[in-house]
Amino acid sequence: MLKNNLINWGLLMIMGLGGCKPSLTSGDTSNTPVADPYPWASWESCSQNTGDHPCNFTLSNQLLMDISLYDYYGGVIVLDLSTMWCGPCNSAAAEVQQVQDQYAEEITYITVLIENSTGDPPTAADITYWCDTYGITSPVLAGSRDLIDVSGTNGWPLTAWPTFFFITDEMVLHTRLQGFSSTWIDTLIQETLNQ
């Protein structure tokens, strides 16, 4: 049973990785394009490098709902890539809700957990535990190492835990921060808001 659940979560996470533009729905046999849920995403390319439009992804949150990065277009996004086994990631998690509350009208703080405490992709129970432990109500998503690419071309350029990405209201990757610092997070949120 546990093995089947892990396989299902893994498949959901892999299928949730997306590109910049939506395509036909997988169950559509009429070859009729579905309405573009992101008509403002008119760019032809994407990457996770500073100055580019980040590629979209869709992952499950703590309520088992699919959440896409592009769902938050129009406001500044703080994207936190963390693991459950990482000490600084746990320190950052303890401040997530405070940051989200402080900037409630201006930002969305999204945490993507890449690994659980044993180094495996997080389960729904892991995500719920993380939210309950730290009192987080902002999105916490179940990810995997498939989201990572040091070059930033086919994934997020992550070489340290946690890594924070600051995305403008026009869906442009402004900057990133490796490691945890409350002061730097606040400074970079302010800087991104002023873009």
Image (cartoon, grey):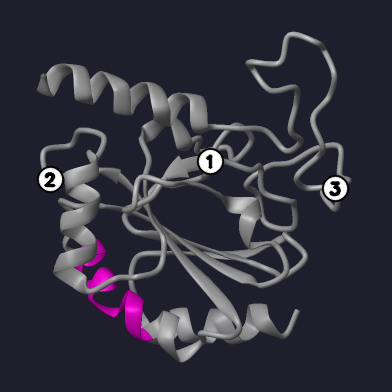
Q: Residue 193 versus residue 178: which sits nearer the camera?
A: 193
Kind of residue indicated by mark 2:
Ser
Q: Residue 175's image quarter?
A: bottom right
Which badge, 2 or 3, comes first in the chain's sequence?
A: 3
Q: Position of residue 156 (x, y in %)?
A: 52, 44
Above or below, comparing residue 77 to residue 43 in the picture:
below
Residue at x-position 36% and y-position 83%: 182
Q: Position of residue 61 (x, y in %)?
A: 38, 50
In front: label 2 or label 1? 1
Q: Alpha-carbon distance for marks 3 and 1?
A: 17 Å
Q: Residue 86's image quarter?
A: bottom left
Q: Are marks 2 and 3 in contact (CB under 8 Å)?
A: no
- Highlighted range, magenta: 88-98
Residue at x-position 45% and y-position 79%: 185
Q: Alpha-carbon distance for marks 2 and 3?
A: 39 Å
The mark found on residue 39 in the picture is 3
Kind of residue indicated by mark 1:
Thr
| Crowd around label 2: few <14 · some 14–19 · many ≥20 (10 Å) | few
Q: Residue furthest bottom?
A: 102
> Which residue is under mark 1?
58
Magenta residues: mostly which secondary structure?
helix
Q: Alpha-carbon distance for marks 2 and 1?
A: 23 Å
Q: Residue 161's image quarter?
A: bottom left
The mark found on residue 117 in the picture is 2
Above or below, comparing residue 108 to residue 113 in the picture:
below
* Element class at badge 1: strand
